[in-house]
Amino acid sequence: MNQIRVLVVDDEPDFLKLIKRRLTKRNVHVDTVTNGEAALAFLREHPVDVVILDVRMPGLSGIDTLKEIRKRFRDTEVIMLTGHGSLQSGIEGISLGAYDYILKPFSIDNLLGRIRAANEHAKLRIARRGQQ
C-alpha cells in the first residue's frame, strides 16, 4: 500500500509538530507549512494527496487558499480544519470544494479515517476521468 502524502497547513507550530508525529506513526507521509501562501508554493513543487487546511490563518485565509487549490490542483483533496467551532466555515469550505471538515479538538483516528476516505475519493475521481 502506498503511503498517503499529506500537507498540513496551520499557523500553530506546536500543533504542526504534534500532528506530523502522530500521523507519521500511522504510515502517513506528512509535510507542514504555516500559511496559505507557503501551501500554494509547496504544492507547485510537491504533489500531495490530501491537504489538511486550517480555516483561520494570518495572511491568505484557509477559505482563500482552498479556492486557489481547487483552481490549480484539482486532484488534491482538502479537509478543512477549524478550532473555532464554526459550522458555517465548514459548510462554506464544502460548498467551495473541500472534501470534508473537522473541528479541533479531534481524535487522530478520526482524522486518519477522513484522510483515507479523501484519498480514496480522489483516486476514484481520477480513475473515472481516465475512463472517459
Image (tube, rainbow, N blue to C red):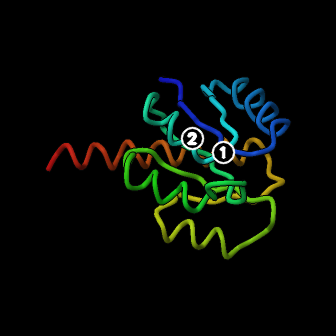
Quadrant of the rendered image containing residue 38:
top right
The residue under label 2 is 39
Q: Residue at x 77, y 30 (%)?
A: 22
Circle 2 residues within 10 Å: few <14, some 14–19, many ≥20: many
The residue under label 1 is 35
Is 93 left, or right, of 34 in this rendering?
A: left
Q: Give the CA distance from mark 2 to mark 1.
A: 6 Å
Residue placed furthest toward the front? 59
Given residues 45 and 18, the one toward you in this image is 45
At label 1, which amino acid type do we have? Asn
Q: Name the spot of residue 119 as percent of width and height, x first.
A: 48, 42
Q: Residue at x 37, y 42 (%)?
A: 123
Q: Name the spot of residue 13 as percent of width and height, x first.
A: 81, 36
> Regarding mark 2 in the picture, which secondary structure is present there?
helix
Q: Residue at x 43, y 35 (%)?
A: 44
Circle number at residue 83: none
Q: Is residue 91 above or below residue 7?
A: below
Q: Are marks 2 and 1 in contact (CB under 8 Å)?
A: yes
Quadrant of the rendered image containing residue 27:
top right
> Regarding mark 1 in the picture, which secondary structure is present there?
loop
Is 25 left, or right, of 46 in this rendering?
A: right
Q: Name the spot of residue 26 as percent of width and height, x first.
A: 69, 27
At label 2, which amino acid type do we have? Ala
